[in-house]
Image: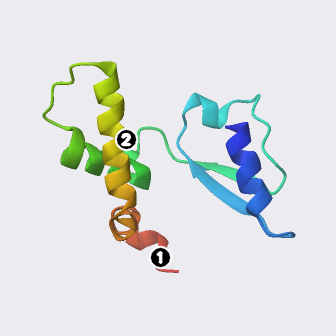
Amino acid sequence: MEAHLAEISATVDPGAHAVLIVDQAGWHMSAKLNVPDNITLLPLPPRSPELNPVENIWQFIRDNWLSNRVFKTYDEIVALCCDAWNNLIDRPWKIMSIGMRDWAHRF
């Protein structure tokens, strides 16, 4: 998580500040986490997956490429997950439509 925050921090314009919305996973909220000065973590309320757009992305992947299957091996799981991810990233408009929150774009 610290490496991820460092990458985000490096892309924030000088003098600007980033707010990163995170769920309350332990690695997002650890007291040991070193958060750069130009980033503020904004935790979502507990048990609120409907507020986290990435949850809808995961559901879309499951619904369209990974559900109703029996996986024979771990390698098959990894290969099919990679295929699903690649199918999704070939559809950036789909990612935007799934992740868009009307309430966040009214301002």
Give residue 68's quadrant in the image.
top left
Give residue 4's quadrant in the image.
top right
Image position, residue 91 (x, y; %): 34, 65
Residue receiving disc 2:
82
- What residue sits 54% from the left and 33% below the top? 25
Q: Residue furthest bottom?
A: 107
Real-space CA distance between mark 2 and mark 1, rounded to the nearest whole angstrom: 31 Å
Q: How is the image coloured?
A: rainbow
Residue receiving disc 1:
105
Q: Tell me if residue 87 comes above or below residue 46 in the rendering.
A: below
- What residue sits 68% from the left and 30% below the top? 30
Name the N-terminal-most of marks 2 and 1. 2
Q: Residues within 10 Å of mark 1 (few under 14, many from 20)?
A: few
Give residue 14's quadrant in the image.
bottom right
Image position, residue 35 (x, y; %): 78, 43
Q: Tell me if residue 32 comes above or below residue 6 in the rendering.
A: above
- What residue sits 37% from the left and 41% below the top? 82
**Residue 58 in view:** no
**Residue 67 placement, left or right of 93:** left
Q: Residue furthest left?
A: 68
Image position, residue 54 (x, y; %): 42, 51
**Which amino acid type corresponds to the residue marked 2 in the rendered image?**
Cys
- Check disc 1 and report its element: helix, strand or loop: loop
**Which amino acid type corresponds to the residue marked 1 in the rendered image?**
His
Count the numbered circles shown: 2
Q: Of residues 78 and 20, which is closer to you in this image?
A: 78
Q: Nearer the viewer, mark 2 or mark 1?
A: 2
Quarter of the N terminus within the rendering: top right
**Residue 87 placement, left or right of 53:** left
The numbered mark at residue 18 is none
- Check disc 2 and report its element: helix, strand or loop: helix
